[in-house]
């Protein structure tokens, strides 16, 4: 490092009176090269040409890499090792989701599904000229990260609350564009913190796909599920009843309201939504059920179909009342999952059509892994001690999913 430092100082002395961008760029290059040489020496345990018993491996030449700086583009010579690898600390790797997005976009180019919008995004990211080998390396690294994340053991249980949802993505298969279903599961662990438990890509959101997905979660260690929140897709409801016997099922109030309002003339939808919303504004389980009964009776005259639906779905939309009042807002709908889906769509919309299913899992898996990490280090989402205190009172009150839809 001493020699490299002298090179920098000498360069500064020689060019100090004639400061220009070429000089600054050369100074940055020399300093960066010195930093890399020092890092490599520390990593392998010996300086260049030094004999040392602590040496772990040897240098193996250099590889060129462009580096965009405020002084312009610089051509770096990154040291290579005979064993292992070295990546300069001054070249900060992109965040996983950004590298995933980069990989997806470049793979789309390679497979002939590029668009003008994607081309503009690549230029904005400064990714012009990336080779197929670089794309392959990025994809391979991300696939390992995502695979480790989606297949990790679920050892933070019991996961008493489980949210399930799906969103559609477009993918190119056998020469045509088709829709596939991306299913996502989130839960709250024993510490009261949220976790992303799993993600998978399937051809459709049918019962068989959901059943396989839920069983895979159980196989990875998912346990202690007492309350599952989802929409009323029949295949999903049946899969929940099969895999989580004894757990209650909560029909998402947001999805339910959307379904209910299709039975109401447009001019009356706002008023009906307000009346039905009062069911969820009560302070206790008994008052919530009483209000449900009053609302159903009130709507039976002008809107008999609405009243009938309220009666049929009563246990499914009121399952949350068996749990602590402080948890109700989080467990009576899929809104927490919908916010996560919105973030996923924000990232995937720039791609539009994925080149294959692996690219979907690569990008969405990286986005979810980042979100999972943020949740784990953030403050507690729910106080799970409240559930422990309530358990003796709710024992035997589990509500199995119905066939309502």
Image (tube, rainbow, N blue to C red):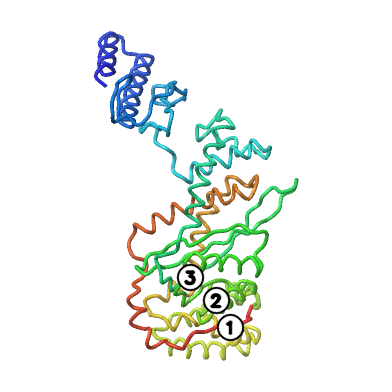
x, y percent for residue 208: 65, 68
Across and down, in percent, residue 254 comes to 54, 71
Instruction: Identify the residue under disc 3.
Output: 162
- Note whether 227 is above or below 343 in the view shown: below
Q: Identify the residue at horizontal 56%, vertical 36% (top origin).
A: 135
Query: Is 173 on the left-hand or right-hand side of 186?
Result: right
Tag 2 or tag 1, which sits nearer the N-term?
A: 2
Cβ atoms at labels 1 and 2 below 8 Å apart: yes
Q: CA distance from mark 2 to mark 3?
A: 12 Å
Quarter of the C terminus within the rendering: bottom right
Q: Which residue is mark 2?
A: 251
Can residue 257 be seen by looking at this rendering? no
Mark positioned earlier in the residue sequence (1 or 3): 3
- Which residue is labeled 1 in the image? 313
Most distant residue in the right direction: 175
Seen at 52% across and 66% down, the residue is 219
* Mark 2 neighbour class, 10 Å CA radius: few under 14, some 14 to 19, many 20 or more: many
Task: Give the side of residue 12 with respect to residue 161, left or right.
Answer: left
Which quadrant, please, contains the N terminus?
A: top left
Q: Is residue 376 above or below residue 272?
A: above
SS at mark 2? strand
The location of residue 389, given as percent across then percent down, is 33, 82
Q: Secondary structure at mark 1?
A: loop
Along the line of sight, the residue nearer the viewer: 196 or 304: 196
Q: CA distance from mark 1 to mark 3?
A: 20 Å
């Amino acid at each position: 490092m001493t020699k490299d430092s002298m090179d920098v100082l000498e360069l500064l002395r020689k060019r100090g009176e004639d400061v220009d961008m070429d000089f600054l760029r050369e100074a940055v290059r020399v300093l960066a090269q010195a930093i890399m040489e020092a890092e490599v020496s520390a990593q392998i345990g010996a300086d260049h040409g030094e004999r040392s018993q602590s040496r772990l491996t040897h240098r193996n030449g250099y590889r060129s890499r462009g580096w965009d700086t405020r002084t312009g583009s610089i051509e770096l010579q990154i040291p290579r090792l005979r064993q292992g690898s070295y990546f300069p600390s001054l070249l900060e790797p992109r965040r996983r989701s950004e590298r995933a997005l980069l990989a997806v976009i470049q793979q789309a180019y390679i497979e002939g599904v590029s668009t003008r919008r994607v081309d503009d995004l690549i230029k904005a990211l400064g990714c012009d000229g990336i080779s197929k080998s670089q794309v392959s390396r990025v994809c391979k690294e991300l696939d390992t990260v995502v695979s480790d994340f989606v297949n990790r053991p679920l050892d933070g249980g019991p996961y008493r609350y489980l949210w399930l949802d799906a969103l559609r993505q477009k993918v190119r298969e056998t020469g045509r564009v088709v829709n596939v279903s991306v299913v996502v599961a989130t839960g709250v662990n024993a510490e009261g913190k949220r976790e992303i438990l799993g993600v998978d890509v399937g051809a459709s959101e049918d019962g068989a796909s959901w059943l396989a997905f839920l069983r895979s979660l159980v196989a990875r260690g998912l346990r202690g599920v007492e309350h599952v929140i989802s929409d009323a897709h029949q295949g999903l409801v049946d899969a929940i009843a099969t895999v989580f016997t004894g757990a209650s099922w909560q029909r998402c109030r947001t999805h339910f309201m959307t379904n209910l309002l299709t039975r109401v003339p447009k001019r009356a939808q706002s008023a009906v939504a307000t009346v039905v919303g009062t069911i969820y504004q009560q302070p206790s389980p008994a008052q919530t059920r009483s209000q449900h009964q009053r609302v159903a009776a009130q709507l039976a005259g002008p809107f008999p179909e609405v009243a009938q639906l309220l009666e049929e779905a009563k246990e499914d939309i009121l399952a949350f009342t068996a749990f602590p009042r402080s948890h109700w807002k989080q467990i009576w709908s899929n809104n927490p999952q919908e916010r996560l889906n919105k973030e996923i769509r924000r990232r995937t919309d720039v791609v539009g059509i994925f080149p294959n299913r692996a690219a979907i899992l690569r990008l969405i898996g990286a986005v979810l892994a980042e979100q999972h990490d943020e949740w784990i280090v953030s403050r507690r989402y729910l106080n799970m001690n409240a559930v422990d205190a309530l358990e003796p009172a709710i024992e035997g009150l589990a509500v199995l999913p119905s066939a309502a839809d």
